[in-house]
Image (spheres, rainbow, N blue to C red):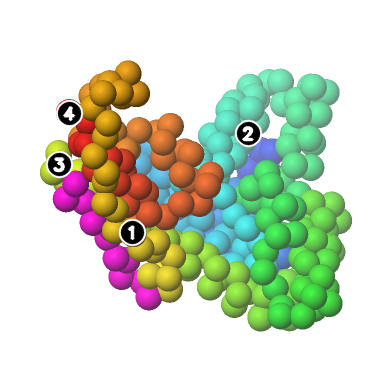
Amino acid sequence: MSTRLASEIYGLGSKITQDDIAIAGQKLPTGRQVLRSFMAHYSEEEFKSSASINKAAKKTFDLILPHYQKADMPMISEYNCIRAIKKLYELDYFKNIMKIPKNRREAPISKSKVEKFNEKLDKTFILWPKNCIEILRNRPASATPEKRRANIDEDLKFFESMKTDRLATYGGRDVVTQSLVKKKVERKRKLDKYYDRQREAACNRPADLSDIQPLVPDDVEEQSRVIEEEEFVPTAPNVSEKNDYTMMKVKKDFFKDPRLVSIFRRAKVAPAAQYSIWSTFYKVSKVVK
């Protein structure tokens, strides 16, 4: 066997080296860059196991993330990114390519499989969400409509290039757009944390819902969203009209029912306003004897 062949890896090309760890360029990484970076990280692990595969995939993700951030492209969750990296190695490469028996590697079907795999590796490694185009079209951009349309068009062209010819680069992209998007993401993160605090507080509330008071969010921006509860003075019911009332029993945490949460989510009702509604509902229901 020649020295050149001895230094190659079947189905992938040249031998993995330390140089493969870095993911360079001003484009979203290809499958080849991702796989070789993963394998370089994995080779550094002393013990080969599922845990070492996870570590190598996480290190590879940490190198991919800056490219998506600089390109200002939306990305799926870290968990799903790591799953995709592991799948590329464990299923697409190791199981479907490396496990081809040596005596069958020269067969036409094996060569065709390797060729298709390499074509896939030379394309952008997809880590963007399925609704990426919708996200790009609806994201905030510049203050002026003309600049906003120009930025969105630029993002869409870059995204289309990454799916096809990969000629575009993210160098010199609009930093104003990226700044606004980051602010929007940060506001959403704070709002989600605020919702989580509200739900956690609801779990620890007493059974008597009449004691519920809207929680005031720490975020000053979110304080304007809190709907102040109006003073409610229940009127005495007409006891002669007993048929107008229905007795029912509810759990102390009934307002956490997924169906109710879903309704208020769709209606964009803040948790503080929700608790005000439930508190008023409870006060009204106490009138019935």
Q: Residues within 10 Å of mark 3 (few under 14, many from 20)?
A: few
| As drawn, 174 above or below 10 | below
Residue that label 3 marks: 208
Front-most of residues 264 and 231: 231
| As drawn, 78 above or below 186 | above
The quarter in which the C terminus is drawn is top left
Between label 2 and label 3, give the one nearer the viewer. 3
- Mark 1 vs 3, N-terminal side: 3
What numbered label is drawn on residue 92?
2
What numbered label is drawn on residue 229?
1
The span picked out in magenta is: 210-220
Q: Residues within 10 Å of mark 1 (few under 14, many from 20)?
A: some
- Mark 2 vs 3, N-terminal side: 2
Q: Does residue 105 show up?
A: yes
Looking at the rendering, which quadrant does residue 140 occupy?
bottom right
- Mark 2 vs 4, N-terminal side: 2
The quarter in which the N terminus is drawn is top right
Q: Secondary structure at mark 2?
A: helix
Q: Secondary structure at mark 3?
A: loop
Q: CA distance from mark 3 to mark 4?
A: 16 Å
Q: CA distance from mark 1 to mark 2?
A: 57 Å
For the point 35% across and 33% down, the residue is 257
